[in-house]
Amino acid sequence: MTVPSLMQNYQRQSYVVQLHKVYNELSQALLRYQTDKNAVNITEAGLNSTAAVQSFIENYMKVVAKCDKLQSPCFSDSYKTMGGNSFTGHNVDTKTYVLASGAALRPLYTLQGNKIINIGVDINGQKGPNILGRDLFYFAIYKNGLIDDFGAVEDDAPLTEAQRQSVFNLACNKADTGSGWGCLGKIMNDSWQMNY
């Protein structure tokens, strides 16, 4: 292996470690929330509106900063796709948060089938590279409290390996026009490795 490829592999693994940390932190917070409410799922526990989702983030995550919109200091002012084009596929008019780990979250209540929340996650906040699928990812939270990718409305978490691969091929792997979905699922399929 050459030094540049070693550096690239190291950087990708660093991103995955940060991504996995946010994933685990959010998973644990969802479990605590559901347990505290003595509920069978997180919708029954009360995650059923934008205000409820914001309250959950503020009370169950280690928030160090809040922004009224997707903006500095919570998120970078601009993002690119892996192909180098500008990425504008995220909702900018919702509250965002920075966690103690430095990760930035943009939660959005969007009931679609069993998926109830989309969360845009920049694993290192404003720091670069600010590229979709490298340090910017999208999580879907389902009624059963699981975090996964999002494909079709009828899908439920956990998604199958084939469902995740399909979303990756349709969205994350589109270097110029990616939507943000599919990258998390591909990493999960590949045993928490960034092989794309």
Image (cartoon, rainbow, N blue to C red):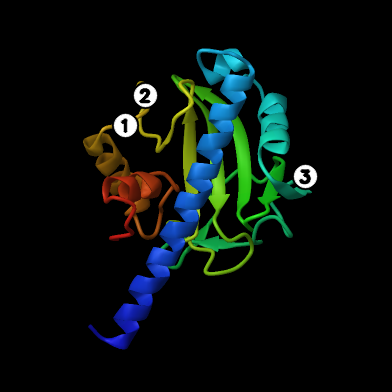
Whichever of labels 3 and 1 marks the residue nearer the N terminus, that label is 3
The residue that appears at 62% across and 44% down in the rendered structure is: 106
Do the numbered discs 2 and 1 sit on residues whose CB atoms are within 8 Å? yes
Crowdedness near tag 2: few (<14), some (14–19) or many (≥20) residues, C-alpha within 10 Å: many
In the picture, measured across the screen, residue 94 lies left or right of residue 176, that is: right
Q: Is residue 137 above or below residue 81?
A: above
Amino acid under label 3?
A: Asp
C-alpha gap between disc 2 and disc 1: 6 Å
Q: Secondary structure at mark 2?
A: loop
Q: Residue at x 66, y 22 (%)?
A: 49
Of badges 3 and 1, nearer the viewer stands 1
In the rendered image, which quarter contains the C terminus?
Answer: bottom left
Looking at the image, can residue 175 be seen?
Answer: yes
Residue designated by label 1: 159
Residue 14 lies in quadrant: bottom left
Residue holding disc 2 = 156
- Please name the residue that numbered disc 3 is placed on: 68
Type of the residue with mark 1: Leu
